[in-house]
Amino acid sequence: MAKKKQKTVTDDLLYDGSRPFLMSEVSTRVEPLYESKKDYRKQLKAIVSEIDELQALMNAQNRYGVLLVFQAMDAAGKDGTIRRLLTGVNPAGVQVYSFKKPSDEELDHGYLWRIIQRMPERGRIGVFNRSYYEEVLVVRVHPEILTRYQRIPEELTNDTEAVFENRFEEIRNFESYATANGIRVLKFFLNVSHQEQGQRLLARLDDPAKHWKFAFADVDEREHWTEYMKAFEDCINATASPDAPWAVIPADDKLNMRLLVAQTVLQHLKQLKLSTPPASERLTDEMDDIKARLKNQQA
């Protein structure tokens, strides 16, 4: 009889297309995994250490790459989560890219053009702070972007719902393509509440050291909160798959959020068939001779 898989604390947070995702049924805060800040730091350090070891195996084997995608409303904690998740992982094995407003050159290409150039290499963990999902989130809430900024011909955008259904399919195909080439995709939605986001934005105004982080657009976009939540719900349902699942992480407690993200990443890495590659045939055959030569060089 096959051994039953042991359930982890992050299993209920994962959506792989086997069940619907409903925004109304998920919480922005859950029972914390830590007892104190000291316990939080201890747990996070241990998880990151394991991630570092697995990334080293990925690099040695050079078969798999991993892409971590982070999407959220502003002030949900993407930057801090990414920083703490990767502090302690060999920097040579990590690629982090933050997608800002597209440049004129990028707008002259399809929306996946700039994405493909930033995909992680085999052996590395790639991180996208925002991503191609902006094309079915921000653009869906503001469809005028299609013709005004992306300059797509109007006859191709008359039916905006068809545009986004096509983009969902394109994204599914893109992630399937990545998986087929050894790049595993794991996507995070950091689910912060409307009230908590407002408090964090106000905190930025109260702290001069954080004024640089404040953007007027953040306040403007809060007025579209309901539309964004609907866009996230539709997006997750349309693009969650076994090979590229979504993890919906309660984000009102930043420390708990980071632990949940770190545990999910570790769980994902452990599913890869990683192993230390064997020595070359020549090294195996000449091992004794090479050791003798090295010892003679030390004499």
Image (tube, rainbow, N blue to C red):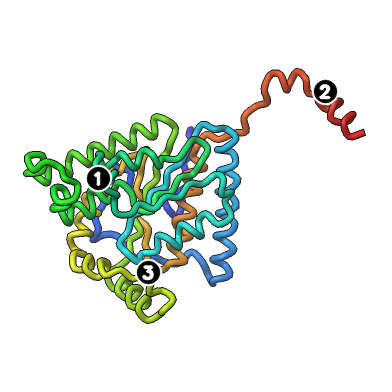
Tag 1's secondary structure?
helix
Q: Position of residue 277 (x, y in %)?
A: 62, 29
Q: Determine whether label 3 and label 1 are within 8 Å by CB.
A: no
Instruction: Indicate which disc residue 288 carries.
Output: 2
Q: Horizontal placement of 59 versus 23: left or right?
A: right
Query: How far, Cα to Cα, is label 3 from label 1?
Result: 25 Å
Quarter of the figure with the C terminus: top right
Given residues 264 and 165, the one toward you in this image is: 165
Q: Nearer the viewer, mark 3 or mark 1?
A: 1
Return the residue at label 3.
213
Please tell me which residue is depicted at 58% across the width and 55% down the height of the picture.
88
Q: Amino acid at mark 3?
A: Lys
Which tag, 3 or 2, sits closer to the chain's start?
Answer: 3
Q: Horizontal placement of 48 versus 261: left or right?
A: right
Residue 23: image quadrant is bottom left
- Tell me: residue 72, above or below residue 213: above
Which tag, 3 or 1, sits closer to the chain's start?
Answer: 1
State the residue lying farthest toward the bottom: 206
Q: Amino acid at mark 1?
A: Leu
Instruction: Indicate which disc residue 99 carries.
Output: none
Return the residue at label 1.
107
Q: Nearer the viewer, mark 2 or mark 1?
A: 1
Query: How far, Cα to Cα, is label 3 from label 2?
Result: 60 Å
Q: Position of residue 191 (x, y in %)?
A: 33, 61
Tag 3's secondary structure?
helix
